[in-house]
Amino acid sequence: MSAFADWDWDIGSKRIADIEALKKDYQWIEEIHVSPNGESSAVIVNIDEGEFNVCVNGTPWREEPFDKMWNLHYSPDGRLTAIVSEMGEWTMAVDGESWSNTFGYLWKPLFSNDGKTIAAAFQQEMKYGMVVNDVPWENTFGNMTCPTLSKDGTNCSATVQTVETSQAEIFEFQKGSYSVAQNGVVWDRNFVNVWNMSISNDGKAVAAEVRLNLYDYTIAVNGKPWDTIFSCVWEPIFHPDNQSVIAPVRINGKWTLAQDGKIAWGGRFVQLWSPKVLPDGKHMAAIVAPSFGKWTVAVDSVPWKTCFNEMVTDLVFNETGSRIAALGKNNGRWTVIVNGTSWNNSFNRAWTPVFSANGQYVAAKVETNGKYSIAVNDQVWSQSYDAIWGPVFSPDSTKILCCSSSNGKIDRQVIPVKTILK
Amino acid sequence: MSEQVNKIVDKGLDQGVINLTQERIEKAINQVLNKEAGARLKSYVETCVHCGMCSEACHVYLSKDKDPIYSPAGKVKRTLSEMIQKKGKVSPEFIREASIIASTECNLCKRCAMYCPFGIDVAYLLLLVRRICHLCGVTPLYIQDTAHSHSVTMNQMWVKDDEWIDTLQWQEEEAQAEIPNLRIPLEKEGADIMYSVIGPEPKFQAHLIYYMSVIMKAAGIDWTMPATPGWDNSDMAMYTGDNEIMGRVKRMHFDTAARLKVNRIIMGECGHAFRSVHDMGNRWLGYKLPPIPVIHAIEFYHELLSSGKIKIKDQYDKKVTLHDPCNVIRGRGLGELSRKVVNTLCSNFVEMTPNREHNYCCNAGGGVINTGPPFKNKRVLSNRIKAEQMAATGADVVISPCHNCHSGLEDIVHHYKLNMEVKFIGEIIYNHMEKPTA
C-alpha cells in the first residue's frame, strides 16, 4: 500500500464494491472490512458447508476455498489477513497465501505499527506460544494469556504458565506459577498473576501488572518488581523519553499515578486508568473518577470540571499534546470532550476521536438512530449511511477520507473538512 | 459451633489456619473494620435491637428447626460481633469457623433484610466476614480455586483463551446443522448486543449457547460474542471477599463491551453475575450502574416475546412452577416479568408459596455451591424448607432462570426425591418457538 501522504486525496467519491450483489452468489456474507487507505473492502463469504473464501472488492481471494476462516483484518500496511483452517489445522493467510506453519488453534492477531510484523497466539498439542511472521516460538507453555506485540514489532510477549499445577492446588498456585515470556524467553521469576503488559518503544523492556501473593500488587519491569507494594494496580506504560514506567496504583482505597514505584500525582481518585504521557514528555493524562459515579479526564493530576455519569473512554491527544479528547457518556448518550469542554451534540454511539495533524480539528464517527455519520468540532455531517469506516484526516488537515455503505454499496469518499464545518 | 464443622475436611480452611498468625488476624480484622467498612457497618451494629424478626426469613434457620444459631442475627453474633467485641483478638480456629459460617451458612440472599424493621443488610455483614477470612487466607478450597481461575483467565472455569473461541465455533457448526446460515458472530464491532455467559456454559453446558444462537437468529438480533477474555460475566471473587479480583474481572467485562462498541450487554440466566455487574463489581470500580447497560435474560426474553420477535408455536404443557432467583428478583425486581415470560411459554403454571421477592433461596447462591463437595450434604440438608416448598406445588418442572439456583435445585430434587425436572427458560423457548429454516 502506498504511503499515507501518497494516498488518493483528490476530492471525490468512488465505488469500491457492491456487497449486496455478492449475496446471490453465496450462502452468507460476513462483516465488511475496509483497508486503511479505503481502496479495498473485504468480506468472508460462505460458499457451501465447510467452504469459505474472502471477496476483496467483490473478487474471490483464491480459487480453493478454506474449510473455515475468521478474524479478517487489514494490517496497517494494507495486507489482508485471516485466520484459516484447512484439513483441521489452523494458520494465518496473508493476502490469500497461507503461512507454512499450521497449529491446533490460532487466534488474537497482532500487528506492528507499520504492519510489517504480524503475530498471533497458537495452541499446538495443548501447548501455547506466539507465532511471529510465520516463525513460532521454540518454547511453549501450559497456558498463555495477554499476548502483546511491541509497536516496532521486535518484541512479542505474553503471560505464560511456567509451573503445572493440579486442579484446586490453591497453595501451589499461591506460590506463583506465572511469568512473562519475551520472544519466548521467560523472566527469571514467577508471580501469582501477571496481567496487561506494556513494551517500551525500543522493544527492549516489558512492564506488567503483577500480584506477588493474594494481596500485594505492583509493577514488574523485565521481571524485577518495584520495591513499593500497592493494594491494586492497573496497566503500566513506558515514558517515551526516559524509559521510566508509569502506572495507576491504589493506596488506602483511592487511586493515583506512580512512576517507577514512587507516587507521581498528588490527587487521589475513586478510579484512575488509561494513563498517557503527552508528546512533550512533561505532562500526563488519565481517565479518572474524581468522586463516585463521576468520570472525566485528569491532566497532571487535575481533573477537568466537566464530568460524565456513566463512563469516559478512548482518551487521545494531538501530535503536540496541546489538545486532549475522549468520549464521555451521560444518561445513555455519547459525546466528545476536548480539553475539558464537552460537545453540545450527543449520539447513540461514538467512536474514538481523531485529531487532524495541525490539531485544529477533532472528528469522530457517530451513530444516531441506526445511521452513521461523521462529526467534526461538534458539527455533524449532513450525510448519514448504513455504515462508515474512518474518518482519516489528510496530511494537510484540509480533507477527510472515509468509506461509507448504503444498501450494500461501498463508496470511498474524500471530502473537504469545510463540508462538515458549515 | 456449627454441627459437623469439625468433621468437614477442607484443605483451603485447614491449611489456611495452619498458616495463620495472631498478628495477621488482627491486621485483617482491623483493616476491614476500621478502613474498609465505615459508617454502614457502624450504623448496622448500633441499630440492631436483636428483635429476631430476621430469623423467620432465613431458609437455613427454618430448615434447621429454628435453631437460633442459624438465624441471620445469630450468624452475625457468631462471627462479626465477636471480632468487633474482641477488637480482632480472635483465634485461628475462630476464623476457620467464621469462614464456614459466612461461606456456607449464609447465601447473602438478602431475604432477611426485608424482614428487619431497620433494613439491616446481614448479607453485607457476612460479606465483611468473608473479606476478613480472605485477608487471613482461610477460604474454602473450591471457591478459592474458582477465584484463582478468575484471576488468571478472567473466567471461573479455567477455560483457556482458545477453548472459548473453539467452543463457540463448535456450537455454531452444531446449530448450522439445524439452521444452515446461522452464525455466532465473533468480535463484531458495532453490533447492537454483546451476549455474555458464565464459565460453566462453554465448559459443561455449551448447548445453552446453541439455544441462544437460535433465539438470536429467529429474532433477527444484531449481536456478537467476544473472542477475548471478558466474555464471562460471573464473579466468584465477589463471594470470596477478593474485591480486587472482583473489580478486575468486572472491568474486563465492561471494557470488552466498550471495545466492541455495543449498545447493550445481554447476559444469560445467571443471578450472581447480575449482582456483580449491577451492584458490587461496578461500584468497586466507581460506576454507579454498569457503564454499558446490562440486561438479564429474563428481561431480554420478555422483550423478544412481547414484541413478537419470537413467536411460540405451542406452549409447554407440563405442570411447571417458578423459582425466583434472589439476585434478579429481590435484587432487580424481575418477578412480574419472569411470570409474564413463563405464562407465555407454559400452559400449566403454578406458583410456589411464598414467591417473588419473598421466595426462599436455593441455598446454592452466594457462592455456597462453589464451596464444593465438602459442603454439599450440609447445603442440601440446610434447605429442607425449599424442598417442602417445591413439593407442595405438585409441579413436574421447576423453572430456574439462574445457573447456581439450577444446580442447587437439582441437588435438592435428587436428595429429597422430588421427581421434578429443573429447566432454564431459554431451553423451553428453544423447544417451543417458531424457528427459521434459513
Image (spheres, coloured by chain):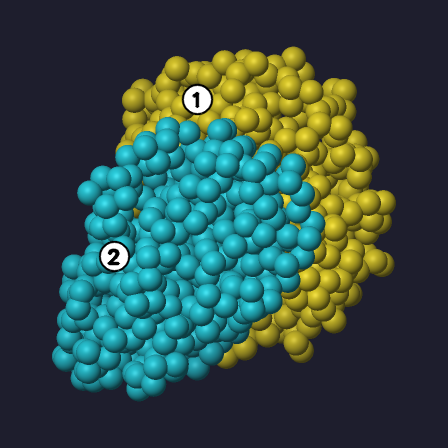
Chain colours: A yellow, B cyan
- Point 60% across, 29% down: residue: A249
Q: Nearer the viewer, residue B188 or B157?
A: B157
- Point 18% across, 65% down: residue: B354
**What's the amino acid at mark 1?**
Pro
Question: From the viewer's perspective, is residue B432 above or below residue A415?
Answer: below
Quadrant in which the C terminus of chain A is drawn: top left
Question: x, y (%) of residue A220?
Answer: 74, 36
Question: x, y (%) of residue A186?
Answer: 82, 49
Q: CA distance from mark 2 to mark 1?
A: 40 Å
**What's the amino acid at mark 2?**
Ala
Instruction: Indicate the chain on which mark 1 is placed.
Output: A
Q: Quadrant of residue A59?
A: bottom right
Q: Nearer the viewer, residue B359 or A403?
A: B359
- Point 73% across, 57% down: residue: A172
Question: From the viewer's perspective, is residue A15 above or below residue A286?
Answer: below
Instruction: Indicate the chain on which mark 2 is placed.
Output: B
Report if the CB atoms under discs 2 and 1 are less than 8 Å apart.
no
Q: What residue would you read off at disc 2? A: B57
Question: From the viewer's perspective, is residue B79 above or below residue A44?
Answer: above
- Point 16% across, 76% down: residue: B349
Q: Is residue B385 left or right of residue B410?
A: left
Q: Is residue A326 left or right of residue A378?
A: right
Q: Nearer the viewer, residue B221 or A124?
A: A124
Q: Are marks 2 and 1 on the same chain?
A: no
Q: Quadrant of residue B410?
A: bottom left
As drawn, the label of residue A290 is 1
Question: x, y (%) of residue A187?
Answer: 82, 45
Label 1 element class: strand
